[in-house]
Amino acid sequence: MGIIHEKAHYVVAVALVAFLIRAFVLSQWNTIKRNGERLKKPPNTLPLVGNGLQFLQSRWKLFSWFDACQRKFGYETVAISVPTLPPGVLIHDPRNLDYVFKNEGIFTKGNFVKGRTWDLFGNGIINAEGDFWKTQRKAGLSFLNTANLRVLTDVALPQYLSESISQLRSSTNGTVVDLQHVFHEITTKLMGKMAYNMAMHADDEFTVSFDYASGGTAERFQNPLWFVTEIFLGAELRKSIAVVKNFGRHIVTKAVQDRQEKEFGEEEGKLDQISGSLIQSLLDAIQDEQMVADAALTYLSAGRDTTGQALTWTFYLLMRHPRVVAKIREEATQLLKEKNVTLTPDQFDSSLFNPVTMPYSMAVFYEVLRLYPPIPFEIRQCNEDVTLPDGTFLPKSSILVWCLWAMQRSKLTWGDDADEFRPERFLDGNKLISRSPSEFPVFYGGPRTCLGRKMAEAIAAQVIPTMACLFDFVPTSDEERTSKTSLTLPMEGGLPVTVKTLTGEEREKLVRIPEIRFSEH
Ligand code: HEM
């Protein structure tokens, strides 16, 4: 028995050495070059394992490493290597990113991304290409048309926002509330009702399983041996994906039933008339119900998690920057006075707040998206040989990575105060400044640019000033918050706060004399 054990160790060790030597030889062979020169390597690149160990760290440390690369190399493209994976580069130059956005047929998700996300998203729009992508995009465009967005801003959002406000008011006795849950609940209800005609909540079994599956799927991008480790440690992930997939099928079955039963008459409210319009458009366009389910689940993740998390980081930063909160309150108070409207927890019309009437609040939202991008990095794979504008030659199958977390903190692009939270950088007087997608890729760019940008902006323009005017939130801890592993950017442990409801008078005082709770930086 002892001898067999020893031999097993020997076999594993030999296999590991052989594997590393092969990886090393392949990495030398496949070196990516710029104008005939090898690319520089990022800090802490090791012989044999390359950057493999960096990718095994927690994502928070990984973000810092990406940021350190960006600080060291500026816009220069650098090589990244991980044993077992095709050769790769990390790009920082907005010119290169612009080229990627304009040539999305060359820079695709490829087997590298699809192989890792397939179990969760299958053929959903995020993974789809060609005609199948076009079909899903068309269905999404029809769901997010102007008339539906108006129902969202005038009916659905005010209703769900007011439900959350009632809950927050009942928690003003020192109870600790998780703000991340509050925002997730709003976006979950919105997407559930409008897209699928379903009453969904942030603590449903589906949502909990989806969070887990998103974390497990994201880990596959950090662990090159995920397909081996999951054999032993992947039971929970497999279970979560099964729950998610079942729910996808349930959405489709319910939508087919709705189709047969639902005949809307004049008496139906506006929200009921449009609810389920995404799933119905998808059913019209796609024959295969499994594919409809994949498409539905992908939209749910794209629309709900990103926006809920962006709002969470917004209030995290606002609690650290009382002067910014005071300016949001000032902007809202001014508008309310002009319209001769009062805002109290019992009586408010949040639909007054929109991206046009609330430029400062929108600048706050963009600044949060700059520092805490809900999709923090992107990966593409070249499906042919290609040369980037900076001269970097990428052979077919190479991997291209850009880290929004790092790029959106670049001093070259954003100036010396790039690390500071300063919403004014998005304002020219009272007008919002828009930045090109290649400099500020938070909503992606080119033909596959985010479909839901207007929806996210409409939600932010209403939720941020309404919540900031009605409540004063106090965090239960001053510690820096981090993000847990996920395909998006959820806050680890949520955002626990205590809540105080503000009277109109108190709000006026806070507009004039912003208290300093944290040192601003
Ligand atoms: C702050 C909120 C949001 C951010 C930062 C954001 C960001 C992004 C990014 C970076 C992508 C590209 C992802 C990739 O392919 O790797 C994307 C795609 C997409 N987003 Fe958003 N998104 C947000 C909100 C929304 C909302 C509310 C919806 C509404 C349903 C939505 C729908 C989509 C769809 C359908 C795509 C796929 C587009 C395509 O491949 O053609 N997003 N988004």
Image (tube, rainbow, N blue to C red):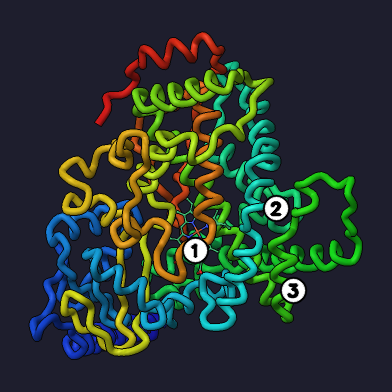
Residue 422 position (above or below residue 257): above
The residue depicted at 9 percent of the width and 86 percent of the height is: 36
Residue at image mark 2: 194
Residue 13 image position (x, y, % from top left): 28, 82
Please tell me in which quadrant of the rendered image residue 317 appears: top left
Q: Find the distance from the CA under tag 1 to the CA under tag 2.
A: 28 Å
Q: Quadrant of the N terminus?
A: bottom left
Residue 78 image position (x, y, % from top left): 18, 70
Q: Quadrant of the C terminus?
A: top left
Q: Is residue 499 visible?
A: no
Residue at image mark 3: 284
Secondary structure of the residue carrying tag 3 is helix
Q: Are marks 2 and 3 in contact (CB under 8 Å)?
A: no
- Of the residues shown, which amino acid type is indicated by label 2? Met
Secondary structure of the residue carrying tag 1 is helix
Q: Which mark is residue 85?
A: none
Please tell me in which quadrant of the rendered image residue 43 appears: bottom left
Nearer-the-camera pick, 466 or 79: 466
| Precedes in sequence: disc 3 or disc 1 | 1
- Of the residues shown, which amino acid type is indicated by label 3? Asp
Residue at image mark 1: 216
* Label 3 near ligand 1 (CB < 8 Å): no
Side (left or right) of 352 relative to 27: right
